[in-house]
Every structure is written in structure tokens, then in C-alpha cells.
Image: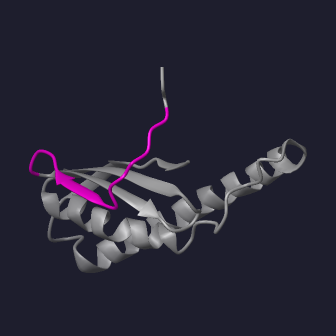
């Protein structure tokens, strides 16, 4: 069974059920990475749309530029450092996203819950 999967499209955006949105977006850093983002806009689509439009650029500017080495001797330590950098990038981006949300929309509409895996080849 062939399990090789490659996403050929450059960007996907789909409104699922009025206030839910799915975004699939390739990332420049780290190379050959893809962001999958599912937003559930509780109380309205504006929150999900805000997150889907703003989160990827915030992450992109904070993610490490390269993947960890696949060399087994250096790989474990380098992977741990890489994972810590990704975790910090996600936290920083989400904090900034919330600050932007509060300044622009907080009292106007609902909130959002999301699931966000980023994968690499």
C-alpha cells in the first residue's frame, strides 16, 4: 500500500457550516511545511474568519527557518530545540492574535476555538 501523500494545491479555504472554516496553507518556513487550521467560530463566522486570515502570517514570521537534522547523532537534541522553537512560535502568535482580536473585534462578535497541526514532508 502506497502511503505517500502530497498536497498539490497552494492554498485552500472552505467555510464548513456557516461559522466553521478550514484553511490549508503551505508555509515558507520551515521548508516543505503545511499548516492545517480548523476554526470553529462560536457565536459567528467573524471570529473564525479573523483567525483564518491572521494566524498563518503570524506563525510564518515566528517559525524556525529550517527543519532539524535527520542525522541520528545530532537529531534528538536538534529536534528537541526545534520543537521548543515551534511551541514558542505558536504561543507568541496566539498571544498576538488575541491582542489584535481584542483591539479590533472583542466586543462586537463571538469567539473561536481551533485545531492547528502543522506538518512537514
Residue lying farthest top? 1
Give percent across and percent down for residue 121: 56, 48
Give percent across and percent down for residue 43: 14, 53
Q: Residue 84 lies in magenta, yes or no?
A: no
Residue 48: quadrant of the picture = bottom left
Q: Is residue 17 left or right of residue 10?
A: left
Residue at the location (52% across, 75% down)?
61
Q: Is residue 96 left or right of residue 30?
A: left
Residue at the location (76% across, 49% down)?
80
Q: Residue 14 lies in magenta, yes or no?
A: yes
Q: Provide the major secondary structure of the magenta segment.
A: loop
Q: Nearer the viewer, residue 117 or 27?
A: 27
Coloring applied to the structure: one colour
User: Looking at the image, is 19 positioned above or below residue 26?
Assistant: above
Give percent across and percent down for residue 13: 23, 57
Q: Nearer the viewer, residue 4 or 76?
A: 4
Residue at the location (25% across, 79% down)?
104
Residue lying farthest front? 2
Give percent across and percent down for residue 21: 22, 52
Total numbered labels: 0
Q: Nearer the viewer, residue 10 or 63?
A: 10
Magenta-drawn segment? 4-18
Residue at the location (67% across, 52% down)?
83
Residue lying farthest left? 18
Q: Is residue 110 left or right of residue 99?
A: left
Amino acid at each position: 500500500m502506497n502511503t505517500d501523500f502530497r498536497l498539490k494545491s497552494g492554498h485552500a479555504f472552505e467555510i464548513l457550516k456557516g461559522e466553521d472554516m478550514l484553511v490549508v496553507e503551505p508555509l515558507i518556513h520551515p521548508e516543505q511545511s503545511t499548516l492545517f487550521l480548523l476554526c470553529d467560530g462560536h457565536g459567528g463566522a467573524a471570529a473564525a474568519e479573523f483567525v483564518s486570515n491572521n494566524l498563518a502570517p503570524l506563525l510564518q514570521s515566528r517559525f524556525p527557518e529550517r527543519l532539524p537534522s535527520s542525522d541520528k547523532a545530532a537529531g534528538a537534541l536538534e529536534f528537541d530545540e526545534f520543537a521548543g522553537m515551534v511551541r514558542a512560535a505558536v504561543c507568541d502568535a496566539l498571544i498576538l492574535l488575541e491582542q489584535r482580536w481584542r483591539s479590533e473585534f472583542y466586543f462586537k462578535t463571538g469567539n473561536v476555538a481551533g485545531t492547528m497541526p502543522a506538518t512537514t514532508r
